[in-house]
Amino acid sequence: MIFRNQQCNVRVGSLKDVRFEAGYHIYVSSAQGTGGLKRLYRHVMLSNEGVKKARWHVDHINLDEHFKLVYTIHAFTHNRLECLLAAGLQSKPVNGFGCSDCACKSHLFYRLYDPADEVVKVFRKYGLEPLVEEIL
């Protein structure tokens, strides 16, 4: 998921107050396991409706008024590539975000400019055909 945001501080669960620079943030996650793509659609609905309670780190920014979900980019695979995709986007991480179940530094990455093309390239690097959906 790609979010556009204003500069702000957001209280993010166990991470406490996190300072976010204005620009874009890329969140890498897997839709494998229980729930599958329903989880992605939950995040889109949460962004549009904003009425559910935060469960994951990403929910805290998704519910914050300074953040706007602008794209979802996903691909179908049976391989666990979440951490490889995160490694491909390694620069400018928000340390500890969204990676409590793995050894990664982060699954949230900052960019000053729209990173959609960069994310598509990373997907293709790992043999995935990305589906890009712009959120209006």
Image (spheres, helix red, strand yellow):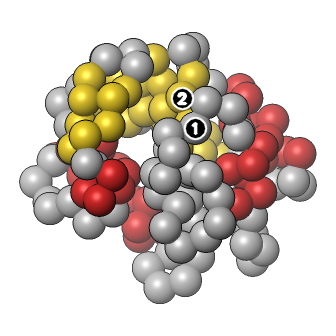
- In percent of the image, x 49 and y 32: which residue is there? 25
Residue 84 shown left or right of residue 46 in the figure? right
- Residue 126: x, y in percent? 87, 53
**Nearer-the-camera pick, 109 or 96:** 96
Instruction: Identify the residue at image location x=29%, y=44%.
Output: 62
Question: Which is more foreground, mark 1 or mark 2?
Answer: 1
Q: Is residue 30 visible?
A: yes
Please, what is the three-letter code of the amino acid marked with disc 1? Pro
Q: Are marks 1 and 2 in contact (CB under 8 Å)?
A: yes
Q: Would you call the spot at circle 2 few (<14 residues within 10 Å), some (14-19), or many (20 or more)?
A: many
- Secondary structure, mark 1, is loop
In the picture, residue 67 is in which quadrant? top left
Determine the residue positioned at 44% across, 79% down.
35
What residue sits right under mark 2 in the picture?
Answer: 110
Rendered position, 88 above or below 23? below
Could you tell whether 103 is left or right of 51 in the image? right
**Which residue lies under the disc numbered 1?**
93
Q: Position of residue 107 (x, y in %)?
A: 56, 51
Place of residue 108 in the rendered image (x, y in percent of width and height, measured from the top left): 52, 44
Q: CA distance from mark 1 to mark 2?
A: 6 Å
Determine whether the residue tagged by mark 2 lies in a helix, strand or loop: strand
Give amino acid for label 2: Tyr
The answer to which of 41 and 82 lies nearer the viewer is 82
**Earlier sequence position, callout 1 versus callout 2:** 1
